[in-house]
Amino acid sequence: MDCIFCKIIKGEIPSYKIYEDEVVFAFLDINPDSVGHTLIIPKEHFKDLTSIDMKTLTHILDVAKSLKLRLEEKLNCDGLTLIQNNGLIQEVKHFHLHLKPYYKNKKDKSIEEVYELLK
Ligand code: AMP
């Protein structure tokens, strides 16, 4: 299957990985909406919210809880939005949860700078 996120998990495409375990992989979004915009993906290929199983989904949420604390601590964000797109508005057809930090005062940092702070 020609899936860009499956290739990222296998290391065939580079990524700014900030977390990995046996079930999930988390990395910085290449085109961030805000400083620290992160994606959490399951290692197994599920297309969307309909096809993913509850055990994997729960694990993704567990990881989101701990990454939330890390983003708050390392980037000093003032809020965090979770988004998961399906259907026409889902660009990459491999389930992913967006973690988008919010800042009271707009912040600008390169993806490399963010990676250095989070890794
Ligand atoms: P969605 O619209 O929910 O499918 O969002 C897909 C997200 O994947 C977008 O925010 C893209 O910027 C991001 N994305 C696409 N390719 C890559 C990549 N190679 N590395 C990191 N993020 C990516």
Image: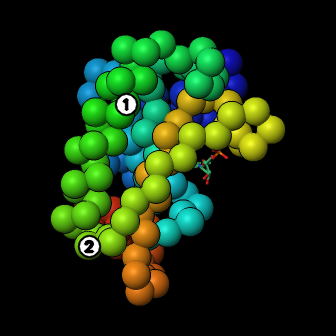
Q: Is residue 119 visible?
A: no
| Amino acid type of the residue tagged 1 in the rendering | Ile
Give the quarter of the figure containing the C terminus: bottom left
Question: Which image quarter: residue 78?
Answer: bottom left
The answer to whether the residues at label 2 and label 1 have Cβ atoms under 8 Å apart is: no
- Mark 2, residues whose alpha carbon is within 10 Å: few (<14), some, or many (≥20)? few
| 2 or 1: tag closer to the N-terminus | 1
- Element assignment for label 2: loop
Q: Residue at x 68, y 34 (%)?
A: 86
Residue 117 placement (x, y as % from top left): 25, 67
Tell which residue pokes out farthest to the left in this image: 73
| Amino acid type of the residue tagged 2 in the rendering | Asn
Residue 60: numbered disc = 1
Q: Is residue 97 visible?
A: yes
Residue 76: numbered disc = 2
Instruction: Give the vertical position of 96 relative to 68 (above or below).
Output: above
